[in-house]
Image (cartoon, helix red, strand yellow):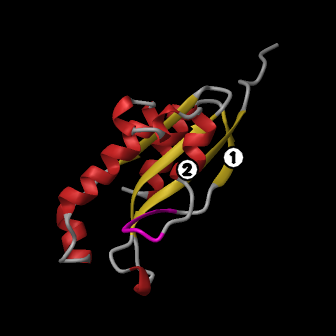
Amino acid sequence: MHSMPEKHLFEYAVIRVVPRVEREEFMNVGVILFCKKEKFLQVKFNIDEKRLCAFANDIDCDELKSHFMSIQHICRGDKAGGAIAQLDMASRFRWLTATRSTIVQPSKVHPGFCSSAADTLARLYNELVL
């Protein structure tokens, strides 16, 4: 008798670029996923400069890239991520997905169950970003 693969609770948020907050227009550029059971916290993103410039011609892609590098450092717990990166994984995820009114914003957090956090991140990224 085969047992079903164990399902783990995960949470994710879509990372969006919001060039002009007042217009409430955004473009999905990444997904951040946290699964406590798998000790998994990763972000997958794509900064398509052509698409972004067509969407908002005055956007600073270098500034955007540095935002995403910070997110990556914090996910990994790298020293380059500063004090936030030294927190435990759940706290880092909460900080990264907190509501903010900057050019890079997370969606609200969505829960789900998965048997592989890495596979789920790849699937969500393909569905919601690409």
Position of residue 58 relative to residue 10, above or below, is below
Position of residue 61 relative to residue 38, above or below, is below
In reply to whether residue 103 is colored magenta, the answer given is: yes
Which element type, helix, strand or loop, lies under badge 2?
helix
* Quarter of the image where the C terminus is located: bottom left
* Quarter of the image where the N terminus is located: top right
Span of residues in magenta: 101-106
Q: Residue at x 19, y 71 (%)?
A: 53
Direction from residue 101 to residue 29 in the image, left or right:
left
Q: Please give the label number shown on residue 95.
A: 2
Amino acid type at image mark 1: Gly
Q: Could you give the CA–CA distance between mark 2 and mark 1, rounded to whole angstroms?
A: 20 Å
For residue 90, what is the image quadrant?
A: top right
Which of 16 and 86 lies nearest the eye of the viewer?
86
- Residue 2 in percent (x, y) is at 77, 16
- Residue 106 in percent (x, y) is at 50, 60
For residue 77, what is the image quadrant?
A: top left
Question: Alpha-carbon neighbours of circle 2 within 10 Å: few (<14), some, or many (≥20)?
Answer: some
Q: Residue at x 27, y 58 (%)?
A: 64
Disc 1 target residue:
112
Question: Alpha-carbon neighbours of circle 1 within 10 Å: few (<14), some, or many (≥20)?
Answer: few
Amino acid type at image mark 2: Trp
In reply to whether residue 117 is colored magenta, the answer given is: no
